[in-house]
Structure formats: structure tokens, C-alpha cells
Image (cartoon, helix red, strand yellow):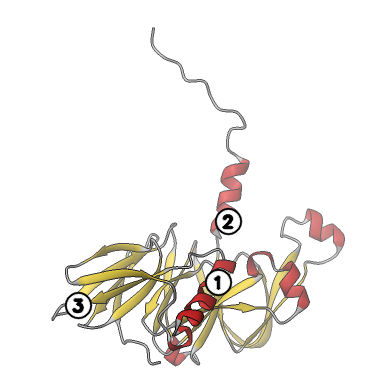
Amino acid sequence: MKCHEVDYTIIGDDMQMVQVELDPGETVIAEAGAMNYMESDIVFEARMGDGSEAESGFMGKLFGAGKRALTGESIFMTHFSNQGGVKRHVAFAAPYPGKIIPMDLGRMGGEILCQKDAFLCAASGTRVGIAFQRRLGAGFFGGEGFILQRLQGDGMVFVHASGTIVERQLQGETLRVDTGCLVAFESTVDYNIERAGNLKSMFFGGEGLFLATLSGHGRVWIQSLPFSRLADRILAHAPKAGGKEKGED
């Protein structure tokens, strides 16, 4: 199934949104709750499935929804369609501050793998699935990198990340990354999980027990501040006991 060809504009700097331009009859799919605003003639509908050919039929939609439930995402996706006669716009924003990374799957071999909560929206026809790791170690010890989302198609997809985004081009070398800092990588990159040094380093080094190892050829996207790390720091420094509210006499 060929994806719809959508145009887009990234708005903002550190708290970005993506504005997608839809020609009459074009559709964009998004995670539930991602929409920021939409113009007239844009009609949206929550559906169980991404609308790709792979999820045609009731059983296909049910199977796809079940796979998304494993990643902690909603089993429904929202489809936004332009039912008017002129170009219209709909905008999407990430649920936390960060950057939006536009990716043209048609120029990336038709597939990208990303963290389970990184997908924001995509042109209709894109298949949104999951990718279990082939290696036992990656499956049991991957933490945030255990289950990855697999985005397939030939159109535009948009993923979001937090902090500063670094794009690395691997040319046969190996890169070791904190599992929470890994945003996405091309399917030509080999991914595995390995132990973070010796036992002393694992438990007292502060870098987690395991690291993601990426090797081969292809692009890798890394975020400097995973939302989970930021949330942990906020909770760690939050008051342990609630304050007592004082009223006026």
C-alpha cells in the first residue's frame, strides 16, 4: 500500500509541533491525544488499526491493536482526513518538551525502528508495528529498549524525542548508548543489549545495568535527556511529606 504524500512544517524550537498539509482526500494517522489544532474540512476518527494493508480485515486490525498494547500505547489510532476541496492543515505536538524528527521512509529503505513511545504521526499507509529483539539478552534486559516500534512504508513519519538530538552515521563502527537515550535507528544497524562493565560498574556507576550496542552501517538518533530520566530526578527531589496549608484567622 503506497503512503499518502503529505507536506509538513516543523514549528518551534524546543517545544515543537509539526503542521501537516493535507490535499483533498489525504489522511494522516497519529497516536491518540497528539492533535494540537486542525482547520475546517479536517475530519478525524479513532480506528483500531493504522489503516495499512497489513491490518486489513477485523483479525488484522485486532492483531495490530494487540501488538500496540504490548508497547503501552493505545490500541486505537486517530485518522485525520481532508474531506474538503482545498488544502487544509492539522498540527500535532509531543506530550512533553522536545524535538520532532521528520523521516522519509521512502529514502530509508522503507523501515525505521524507534523507542516504543517515540512515534507521533505519519502519512496514511504507514504500518506501525513492534519489533521484538532476536537476541535473548536484548529481550530480557533491554529495559526501555526491550520492545521497539517498527515503522514501515514509503512516506513521511514523525517521531519525537527530548533534549538535544544527535544524529550519528555509523560506518562499520560500534556505538554504545544508554537504552533510554536511544531514539531510533535504521534497520541496517545491528542492535543488541550488553552488560555495562563489571559488577561494580553496573551497580555503582550510575549508568544503568545494561547498554544498547549499535553496530554496522546506518543512521542512529540519540536524545540527551530522556523523559524517564527527567521524571526520576523530579521525583527524587520532590518533598517527602506534604506541607500543611495555613489559613487566615
Of mark 1 and mark 3, the one earlier in the sequence is 1
Q: Which residue is drawn at 22% across and 71% down?
A: 42
Three-letter amino acid code at the position of disc 1: Gly
Tell me the distance, in whole angstroms, between the alpha carbons under discs 1 and 3: 30 Å
| Tag in front: 2 or 3 | 3
Q: Which secondary structure lies at badge 2?
A: helix
Count up the numbered dots. 3
Residue 228, labelled with which disc? Answer: 2
Residue 89 rendering spot, x and y as whole percentages:
23, 72
Of mark 2 and mark 3, the one earlier in the sequence is 3
Tell me the distance, in whole angstroms, between the alpha carbons under discs 2 and 3: 39 Å
170 above or below 117? below
Q: Can residue 164 be seen in this view?
A: yes
Tell me the distance, in whole angstroms, between the alpha carbons under discs 1 and 2: 24 Å
Q: Are marks 1 and 2 in contact (CB under 8 Å)?
A: no
To which residue does mark 1 refer? 66
